Image (cartoon, rainbow, N blue to C red):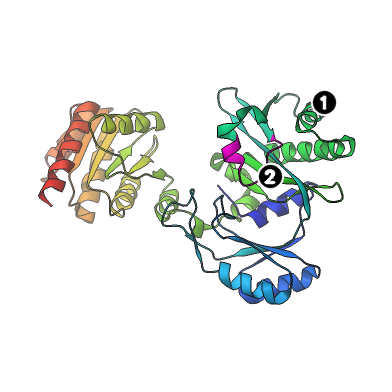
Amino acid sequence: MKIHEYQAAALYKSYGVPVPEGIPAFTVEEAVEAAQKLQEGPFVLKAQVHSGGRGKAGGVKFATNLEEVRQRASEILGMTLVTKQTGPEGRVVQRLLVNRSVEIDREYYVSLTVDGALGRVVMIASAEGGMEIERVAQEAPDKIYTLAIDPALGLMDYQARDMAAKLGFNQAETKQFIAIARALYRLFVEKDCSLVEINPLAVDKSGNLVAADAKINFDDNALFRHPDIQQLRDLNEEDPREVEASKFDLNYIQLDGNIGCMVNGAGLAMATMDIIQAFGGMPSNFLDVGGGATAEKVAGAFSILLSDPKVQGIFINIFGGIMKCDVIAQGVVEAAQKLQVKVPLVVRLEGTNAEAGKRILAQSNLDITPADDMADGAEKICRLVAEKEARS
């Protein structure tokens, strides 16, 4: 789960990480009132959307007085911000953050994330922070420093000090960096984060380190432990189909293809997408209904798939273990009848009660194409979709 910068900054502050004084605003008048409360300018107004690259897209603007704050806020609020992360459709800005501007002397980058290969939290840092950090990572990877953290020991002072030396901090700055690094690690672990990032970590004209930007992502699987974090969720920033999927406890990710996939198990879902592409098709989604799918879940999954106008066919690939194929088949039949599925539908059932499930599908009198195995199903759905598109 992602949250907005102003929410992340508030968490940083609660853990002792220095952040610029700032106030969120939802209207132009609220932005002006926020600047009045901050009293001293200059100010920086930042669009609050779940995307990087806001500055390059015109979502970050500076103002020196209240009139300029009003003007800049009216320019940002309501604009469609298009970045590499939003895609061409962009995101409509519905809120912004009014910060007291930081007089930046130098910019750095620091983040914490999980390295799946190592099975550890890693700190990533660079003396080349700012808007071009992605370019630095591509063109000068030697300027990106990585530190793996032992989960039994946590981040040690000597490790943070060594990182500070690599970044070129002086003695006073190193002391501040160690405190910030340890606070970020504590936040990362205690709040079950998947990413904590400051870009830029600024050194101001007085030699103080300040988190001039704040970004936090959380592990969805751990949110049940953090009801306070769940309350920070902004559904307007998420794909409506992904939001709907979460209501049915489905794992759904929108993709760019035209073949809808409904699968049980993340590994099988990945393999299904791969084999569809091997037969010349393109999956429109990742959809894992889990190991205990019910007829209600199947109906919900169908509804989500069909709400995507790009979907020209659906491939259901189920391997029943705990899940019973006859239950899934009944759910497929009920959902197909209720939703009046008008695109090719291919179903592969294997495992517990598979034969009973196949009989239910065969006796339904619906236009459902059975598949003997995963490859057979992928070949059939790709062919049927291609034929459908050729006719239209």
Residue at point 37% right, 31% down?
A: 270
x and y percent of residue 313 in the render? 22, 45
Identify which amino acid the numbered label 1 is placed on.
Answer: Tyr
Q: Is residue 132 magenta?
A: yes
x and y percent of residue 358 in the render? 18, 34
Which mark is drawn over residue 158? 1
Residue at point 68% right, 72% down?
A: 69
Q: Nearer the viewer, residue 207 or 158?
A: 207
Q: Residue furthest front?
A: 139
Q: How many marks?
A: 2
Give the vertical position of 28 relative to 250 (above or below): below
Q: Is label 2 in a helix, a strand or a loop? A: strand
Residue 353 visible in the displayed image: no
Which mark is drawn over residue 198? 2
Q: Which residues are magenta?
A: 126-136
Q: Nearer the viewer, residue 249 or 380?
A: 380
Q: CA distance from mark 2 to mark 1?
A: 21 Å
Q: Which callout, 2 or 1, points at the residue further toward the start of the chain?
A: 1
x and y percent of residue 157 in the render? 82, 29
